[in-house]
Amino acid sequence: MSERDRFAVMMERSAALKRRIAVELADAVVAVVAACETSLRGGGKLMFCGNGGSAADSQHLATEMLIRLRGAVERDSWPALALTLDPAALTAGGNDYGYDRVFERQILGLGCRGDLLIAISTSGRSPNILRAIGAAREKGLIVAGFTGRTGGDMAALCDLCLHAPSDSTPLIQQIHITAGHIICGLVEERLFPRNIRPE
């Protein structure tokens, strides 16, 4: 099979998965949108964490919330924070407490009741994500998980869980960022309905 054909196959696989989640994940996405709205209207903040590609997704989605997703929407900035952004905090936490606790320590110091943690792990088994969820529970945060088909250990620990129905890390990550963009767009529409202009 040529690379052009392989590209077409991979694109179709991604598209088929997105068509599937349009039905299977609709309720989970709407529930996360509602949790974001509740937190923001109540004066809370959105906190994100993940490792590797999921760390990049955390930063990407936090930025969409903090700044804005679409140029067609003029809105207030929302308090959103990716826990992957501060190298001093990450390296100090890793050095002093171990890598498993780098997000936990930040949540214990920065998290407040009414905040929402969006924890991203394709496997659902990352120890530092599981500890972050535990810290969020201790502090009274709501927890939304973005994970893969099985959800690993994290699924049972989250208030809400968005399962990408795949075991392929790249496909799971494609679903996470797509769903994240949609969630942000729907939150914008809920909080600023009069400021939405057609794009």
Image: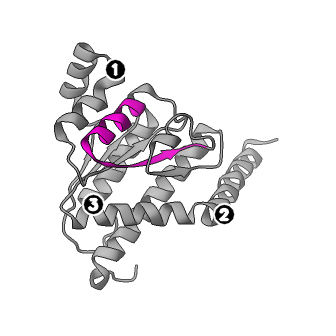
User: Which residue is under mark 2?
Assistant: 19
Relative to 145, does residue 131 appear above or below in the rendering? above
User: Which residue is under mark 1?
Assistant: 99
Q: Which residues lie in the magenta part?
A: 129-148
- Between disc 3 and disc 1, whose residue precedes? 3
Residue at (19, 68) in percent of width and height: 76
Image x and y of residue 96, in percent: 22, 14
User: Which residue is under mark 3?
Assistant: 39
Residue at (36, 35) in percent of width and height: 134
The quadrant where residue 167 appears: top right
Out of 74 and 50, give the one closest to the viewer.
50
Q: Nearer the viewer, mark 2 or mark 3?
A: 3
Q: Nearer the viewer, mark 3 or mark 1?
A: 3
Count neighbours of disc 1 (C-alpha within 10 A) and say few if under 14, some if 14 to 19, many if 20 or more: some
Image x and y of residue 116, in percent: 31, 52
Image x and y of residue 108, in percent: 22, 35
Secondary structure category for the residue under label 1: helix
- Between disc 2 and disc 3, whose residue precedes? 2
Residue at (31, 82) in percent of width and height: 193
The quadrant where residue 1 appears: top right
Q: Are marks 1 and 2 in contact (CB under 8 Å)?
A: no
Kind of residue at disc 1 = Tyr
Q: Does the magenta run of residues contain 37? A: no
Q: Are marks 3 and 1 in contact (CB under 8 Å)?
A: no
Residue at (32, 58) in percent of width and height: 64
Q: Left or right of 138: which side holds 155?
A: right
- Between disc 1 and disc 2, whose residue precedes? 2
